[in-house]
Image (tube, helix red, strand yellow):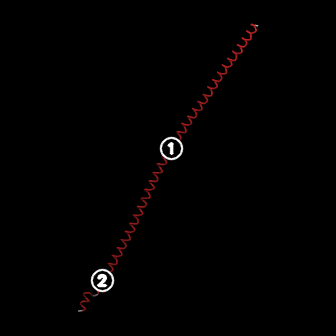
């Protein structure tokens, strides 16, 4: 009976058992490899997400820089315009001062001429008074 049991369970069974064990080991190895592949894939996904976030931050920084540069350009243009307006106003003020000095000089010359006329009239009046005094004596 033992022979029959060995025949039924015998060498073929042991080979089947070894083949099944090898298949289980191979399946476990594939499961580990699949798990490692998932971990690598997850790591790559995280790395790509980090790169995507960094690119977005760089894009935002570049946009902020562009806006600041545009504001600086606008401020520089405003300053240039203000400087030009100040130059024009300064030129106008200088011309006004020159005109005022000329008007003052002209007014002083007119006053001087009037003073000369008045002085001449006084001399003439004195001369007339002197002549009248002489005539009265």
Could you say which is closer to the camera, residue 35 or residue 135? 135
Q: Nearer the viewer, residue 6 or 34?
A: 34
Determine whether, in the image, residue 118 is placed left or right of residue 31. Answer: right
Q: CA distance from mark 2 to mark 1?
A: 86 Å
Residue 60 at what x, y percent from top left?
A: 44, 53
Residue shown at 72%/13% (left/top)? Answer: 126
Residue under pointer 2: 17
Q: 40 or 20, which lies in front? A: 40
Q: Earlier in the sequence, mark 2 or mark 1?
A: 2
Query: Disc 1 on helix, strand or loop?
Result: helix
Quadrant of the frame with the C terminus: top right
Q: Extreme front residue here?
A: 137
Q: Is 1 above or below relative to 63?
A: below
Residue at x-position 67% and y-position 20%: 115
Please name the residue shown 60% across and 30% down the image: 97
Residue carrying label 1: 75
Dot 2: within a 10 Å radius of its alpha carbon, few (fewer than 14), some, or many (20 or more) residues? few
x then y, percent, for residue 59: 44, 54
């Amino acid at each position: 009976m033992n022979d029959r049991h060995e025949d039924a369970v015998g060498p073929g069974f042991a080979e089947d058992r070894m083949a099944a064990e090898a298949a289980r080991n191979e399946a476990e190895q594939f499961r580990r490899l699949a798990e490692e592949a998932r971990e690598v894939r997850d790591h790559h996904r995280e790395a790509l997400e980090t790169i995507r976030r960094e690119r977005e931050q760089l894009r935002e920084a570049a946009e902020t820089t562009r806006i600041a540069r545009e504001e600086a350009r606008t401020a520089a243009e405003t300053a240039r315009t203000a400087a030009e307006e100040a130059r024009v106003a300064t030129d106008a003020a200088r011309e006004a001062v020159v005109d005022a000095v000329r008007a003052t000089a002209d007014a002083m010359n007119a006053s001087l001429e009037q003073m000369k006329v008045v002085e001449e009239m006084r001399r003439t009046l004195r001369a007339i008074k002197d002549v009248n005094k002489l005539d009265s004596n």
